[in-house]
């Protein structure tokens, strides 16, 4: 199964807030038709994703909203480039130069892989039914990963 993501919208809030709009996240990444949504609470998680995706950001606008107690500053960007997401069943299916990273797949943190392309990246995630390659972190490790990189 292959998914292509292009023209994603990146919304960066001045800080993470646990409200109805942000849900505790500082960065929201939205695809067309709400496909390919990602969210990050930490700068590290977002910067890691941006490096892996090999996308460039084009600034669109800055806006602000005013709540009862504070102002929220919002920066909006559009991505330039393409992410191609692929599922794999066996490690032999991966390109030789694929780089391993920890990522979310089907709700679990597992070993995923990526390669940079000329205009973005190809991401390889293990099929959840492939027991040889879909090995998720234990609960404590999962929570630590989400805290630091989520």
Image (spheres, rainbow, N blue to C red):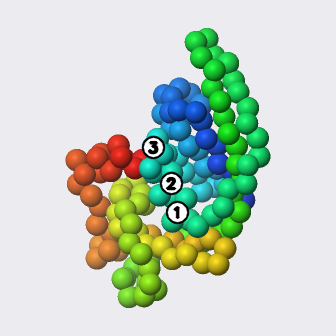
Q: Residue at x 69, y 24 (%)?
A: 65
Which residue carries the number 2 mark? 47
Is residue 32 shown to the viewer in this render? Answer: no
In whole angstroms, how far apart are the C-alphas of marks 1 and 3? 14 Å
**Visible residue check, residue 65:** yes
Q: Which quarter of the image is occupied by the N terminus?
A: bottom right
Which disc is residue 51 wearing?
Answer: 1
Q: Is 119 placed above or below 61 here? A: below
Of residues 28 and 52, the one drawn nearer to the viewer in this rendering: 52
Q: Are discs 1 and 3 less than 8 Å apart at CB?
A: no
Q: Which image quadrant is residue 66 in?
A: top right
Q: Which residue is mark 3?
A: 42
Residue 132 coordinates in the image, percent (x, y): 28, 76
Q: Quadrant of residue 85?
A: bottom right
Q: What percent of the width, then of the height, locates residue 90? A: 37, 82
Residue shown at 58%/33% (left/top)? Answer: 14
Comparing 8 with 92, the one in front is 8
Within 10 Å of the Cα at label 3, are there few (<14), some (14-19), or many (20+) other Cα atoms?
some
Mark 3 vs 2, N-terminal side: 3
Mark 3 to mark 2 CA distance (whole Å): 9 Å
């Amino acid at each position: 199964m292959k998914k292509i993501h292009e023209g994603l919208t990146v919304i960066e809030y001045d800080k993470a807030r646990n409200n109805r709009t942000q849900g505790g996240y500082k960065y929201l990444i939205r695809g067309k038709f709400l496909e390919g949504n990602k969210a990050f609470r930490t700068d590290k998680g977002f910067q890691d994703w941006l490096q892996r995706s090999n996308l460039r950001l084009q600034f669109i606008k800055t806006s602000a909203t005013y709540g009862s107690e504070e102002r929220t500053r919002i920066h909006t960007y559009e991505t330039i480039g393409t992410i191609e997401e692929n599922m794999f069943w066996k490690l032999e299916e991966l390109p030789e130069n694929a780089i391993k990273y920890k990522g979310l797949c089907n709700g679990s943190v597992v070993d995923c892989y990526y390669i940079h392309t000329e205009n973005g990246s190809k991401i390889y995630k293990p099929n959840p039914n492939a027991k040889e390659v879909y090995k998720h972190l234990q609960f404590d490790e999962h929570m630590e990963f989400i805290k630091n990189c989520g």
